[in-house]
Image (cartoon, grey):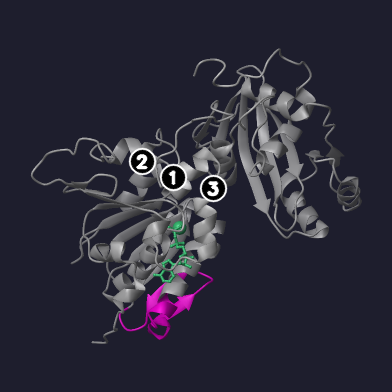
Amino acid sequence: MATIEIDLNGINAVYRPYLRDSHRYQLFFGGSSSGKSSFLATRAVLDALSGRNLLIVRKVQRTLHASCWNEVLKAMRRLRAQGLFKVSRSDLTMTVRRTGAQIMFAGLDDAEKIKSITPLNGALTDVWIEEATECEFEDLKQLDKRLRGPSRFEKRVTLSFNPTWREHWICQEFFDGWAEPGERVPDGADVVCVPGRSYSDPRVTILRTTYRDNAFLTEDDRRALEEETSDYYRTVYTLGQWGTHGDAVFTNWRAVSLRETPPPEDAEEFYGLDFGFARDPCACVRCRLDRTDRRIYVTGEFYETGLVIWQLAERLKAFAGRAAVTCDSADPRCIAELRALGIRAVPARKGPDSVLHGIQWLQGYQILVDTACADMIRELSAYAWKEGSPPQPRPGDDHLIDALRYALESEQTCRPARLRRKREVGL
Ligand SMILES: Nc1ncnc2c1ncn2[C@@H]1O[C@H](COP(=O)(O)OP(=O)(O)O)[C@@H](O)[C@H]1O
Ligand SMILES: [Mg+2]
């Protein structure tokens, strides 16, 4: 039997006790850059070498390569185990040469693949859902069912995520026993709880980590997290705590599966685009408007940096077809170039106060965002008011929100009296 030597110093200390944990549900959550993904990728490689068959999923298939797939390859290299695996990028599998044990990858948007996925040998023993807050409870239930069949290993479902909102189903489903520092620790002979840090009962184990737990972080990353000024980002990404609405601009939105709650047939479709290139992304949104029930359905997005104009035109052709796309009008040349390339790009009018007016208008609707639109969900979560008067949203991570305002600009004809600012209405 081949053995590989593991240098435990290459694994952050806080995660080491979880290398062999066998709880059915394992939740690794907390701030960004806390080493969650790196650890779980490392564990996946070691688990496959020990004979387990793993399925690693994210909500959207196209995000797999840039995230978990690369993480696992990096972990393999750190462990000097590349030679032990046959890696097939085309069918997204990594197979242990000697035993046939596999690490498989899939997007939850590829339902057929998820349904049919079966390892070469034996049963699937593990599912790791990366960025699990992008998923729905129903996704978890379906994946849970994939863990069938006899195996000498305990079956496990691992979730890793940043704690986006206290109202999230993951918080409701798994965090009953969780205690923050100073809160009462749940009693029970088989419950182990370290407030603010970890929780275990016979079914579930939870670990919270932050950037402080990651010994491999660069000084720049550390500083960026420590200097975060947005309350929401600081809570969620620096401190790793469940987000609350605080000074959020939009509280009138929800992430839902639009497959399950589709827009009505007659809801008109709109497209909006915010230009960007190096630092800022090109952000494009597709939405449908239900005027009767005053609902906006955000049905699709793309969000990419580094697109030159002809690449953007290609992406728009695939995304919007022949539909009109209302664009940021700050750079008329981009619009002219898109038109020359066959896109029906139209400039947004952006009158005075158009940002506040657009926000006010959007606040009058219920906004349902498809769970696949992860960037829009992130932006809406973090979009907050700046201190001071007149009211102004904090600029920065608002590209898709701007695109949404442009998309629906033609609808924003009347000018309601006042912006609803949460403090003012006593929320
Ligand atoms: N065990 C490790 N060995 C080397 N680098 C690591 C390790 N764990 C984390 N890192 C570094 O820290 C960064 C952030 O870790 P990551 O796992 O992506 O955090 P999270 O998933 O919690 O956001 C990684 O990009 C990597 O550079
Ligand atoms: Mg991660």
**Residue 346 - label:** none
Whether label 3 touches label 2, CB < 8 Å: no
Q: Is residue 338 visible?
A: yes
Residue 96 within the segment the image draws in magenta: yes
Q: Quadrant of residue 410?
A: top right
Rounded to the nearest angstrom, the CA distance separating label 3 from label 2 is 25 Å
Q: Earlier in the sequence, mark 2 or mark 1?
A: 1
Residue named by callout 1:
133
Relative depth, front residue between 363 and 169: 363
Whether label 2 touches label 1, CB < 8 Å: yes
Boundaries of the magenta span: 76-99
Residue named by callout 3:
228
| Element carrying mark 1 | helix
Q: Quadrant of residue 244?
A: top left
Relative depth, front residue between 213 and 407: 213
Residue 85 rendering spot, x and y as whole percentages: 40, 80
Which residue is found at the position 75% from the left and 59% from the top? 307
